């Protein structure tokens, strides 16, 4: 790698790590904790690449992108941010950042993207930037897992593409929110957003009425997999006659439409018309690491709306992480909404959560908790079998090995830290690992530091 890289981040550790890594790769590095300093360097003509955080002490890194593009057309900017929401990804794409990575980021991945940015800059300039729009902070599409970050990036890429969009995922995963986000951040945002069902296509004027209502905007067919043969045929005819000022067509489905088509229960011509781009929304059990983020989001939103502060006790949070959430994000949101109103104290207890989930028995036990005298290996085996059974005959998403190891590793380290009073030297000795390895795992696994569990 060859070039000068400008790094802006208010975290000294990140600045140090990036400076050392980029310097070893052969680059010159200027690092700062100030956007003002960064913009001065850009104006002076320094740098072949910018790596910038979003939230800085003296401003917002995303809001600087249009000015950077104006001062230095073609200067690539990689945005890194702890704000792991779809809005950040979309705003970064709208402002035409070269790339966007959520924190905590993978250093080798960032190095590869930096090398690619420097290489592209040597051959072509990027177009002028678009000022990012404000607002939308309340959209509950939150997640730092790779699956959600990949979804955010795909939404950002397709929101202005002239292609139909199929949004697939279980009930309660947020398919309608994805459809709304695609519309609200697209060039069609000033036009109608219409959601339709099979019944809206019926009748002599059904199709023409729908096209008139959604003219130039977005037309979303909800749960298109439930459409009967007649509704499917009408939808095919509608897609063939839309003509000028046609709305963008999106559809949602809880079931695998390709499998339904192969089984002869969904028209092939309709499947290929609707599936220009498929956005797959993961189930909550497939992104367990996002559950604390979502819970915090819903509790903070409840505080704004109800004026009541609530937080989950550590025991309650452990149950929230372990519960299978068959109703996905919608179920989690509804449970927390109820607890915001009904909880007796600011801290929501384990008992209150269990009651809200519909049983005085721990949800962990309800899905196969420990049996007296049972060996740990047997208990783990039952939980793993339960995980596979939850997919109803389908294989779980790829990456089961790493995902299961992480699920075991996080509580093991947290419990060991608590047992040793937060003393990392004792904890590392207890676990039988090197202290530096323990520190790295605490960082990589995003293990939160509490009063009882302080970094030593």
Image (cartoon, rainbow, N blue to C red):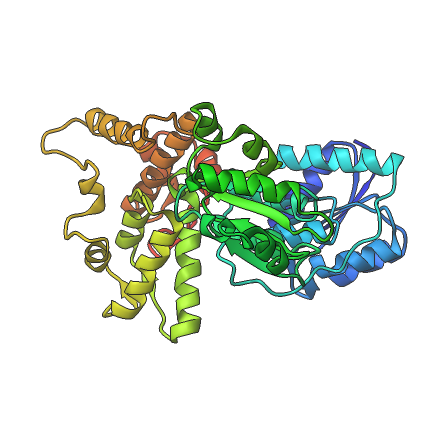
Residue 12: in sight, yes or no?
no
Query: Is 129 left, or right, of 401 in this rendering?
Result: right
Query: Which residue: 39% across, 45% down?
Result: 171
In this image, 174 relative to 354: left or right? Answer: right
Q: Given the current orientation, which residue lies at the most extreme front position?
A: 204
Q: Is residue 425 above or below residue 34?
A: above
- The location of residue 19, given as percent across then percent down, is 70, 42
Asked if 428 appears above or below 313 in the picture, the reply is above
Report the residue that reaches farthest toward the left: 372
Res 278 visible: yes
Task: Check the picture and name the quadrant holding the N terminus.
Answer: top right
Q: Residue at x 46, y 23 (%)?
A: 262
The quadrant holding residue 393 is: top left
Locate residue 73 relative to residue 256 in the image: left or right: right
Corner quadrant of residue 275: top right
Q: Is residue 24 left or right of residue 152?
A: right
Residue sitting nearer the eye, 366 or 444: 366
Q: Residue at x 32, y 37 (%)?
A: 412
- Nearer to the camera, 175 or 12: 175
Out of 204 and 455, give the one closest to the viewer.
204
Where in the figure is residue 67, as x and y percent of width and height?
Answer: 82, 60
Coordinates of residue 443 in the picture (x, y in percent): 49, 43
Across and down, in percent, residue 421 comes to 31, 49
């Amino acid at each position: 790698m060859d070039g000068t890289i400008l790094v802006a981040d208010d975290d000294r550790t990140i600045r140090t790590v990036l400076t050392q890594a980029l310097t070893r790769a052969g680059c010159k590095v200027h690092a700062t904790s100030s956007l003002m300093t960064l913009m001065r360097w850009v104006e002076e003509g320094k740098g072949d690449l910018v790596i910038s955080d979003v939230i800085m002490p003296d401003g917002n890194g995303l809001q600087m992108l249009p000015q950077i593009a104006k001062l230095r057309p073609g200067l690539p900017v990689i945005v890194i941010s702890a704000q792991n929401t779809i809005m950040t990804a979309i705003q970064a794409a709208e402002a035409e950042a070269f790339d966007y990575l959520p924190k905590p980021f993978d250093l080798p991945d960032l190095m590869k993207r930096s090398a690619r940015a420097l290489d592209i800059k040597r051959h072509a300039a990027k177009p002028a930037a678009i000022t990012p729009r404000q607002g939308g902070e309340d959209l509950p599409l939150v997640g730092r897992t790779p699956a959600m970050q990949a979804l955010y990036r795909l939404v950002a890429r397709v929101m202005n593409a002239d292609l139909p969009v199929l949004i697939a995922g279980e009930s309660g995963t947020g398919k309608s929110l994805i459809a709304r986000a695609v519309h609200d951040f697209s060039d069609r945002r000033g036009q109608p957003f219409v959601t339709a069902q099979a019944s809206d296509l019926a009748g002599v004027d059904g199709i023409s009425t729908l096209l008139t209502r959604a003219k130039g905007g977005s037309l979303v067919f909800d749960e298109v997999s439930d459409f009967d043969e007649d509704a499917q045929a009408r939808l095919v005819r509608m897609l063939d006659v839309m003509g000028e000022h046609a709305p963008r067509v999106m559809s949602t489905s809880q079931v695998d439409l390709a499998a339904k088509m192969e089984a002869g229960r969904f028209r092939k011509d309709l499947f290929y018309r609707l599936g220009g781009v498929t956005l797959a929304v993961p189930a909550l059990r497939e992104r367990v690491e996002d559950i604390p983020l979502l819970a915090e989001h819903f509790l903070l939103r409840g505080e704004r709306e109800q004026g009541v502060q609530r937080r989950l006790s550590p025991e309650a949070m452990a149950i929230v992480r372990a519960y299978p959430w068959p109703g996905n994000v919608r179920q989690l949101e509804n449970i927390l909404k109820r607890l915001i109103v009904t909880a007796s104290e600011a801290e929501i207890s384990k008992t209150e959560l269990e009651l809200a989930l519909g049983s005085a028995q721990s949800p962990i036990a309800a899905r196969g908790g420990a049996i007296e005298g049972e060996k740990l290996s047997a208990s783990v085996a039952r939980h793993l079998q339960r995980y596979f059974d939850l997919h109803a005959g389908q294989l779980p998403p790829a990456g089961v090995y790493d995902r299961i190891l992480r699920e075991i590793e996080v509580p093991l380290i947290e419990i060991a830290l608590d047992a040793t009073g937060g003393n990392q030297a004792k904890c590392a000795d207890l676990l039988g690992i090197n202290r530096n390895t323990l520190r790295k795992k605490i960082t990589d696994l995003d293990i939160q530091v509490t009063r009882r569990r302080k970094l030593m």
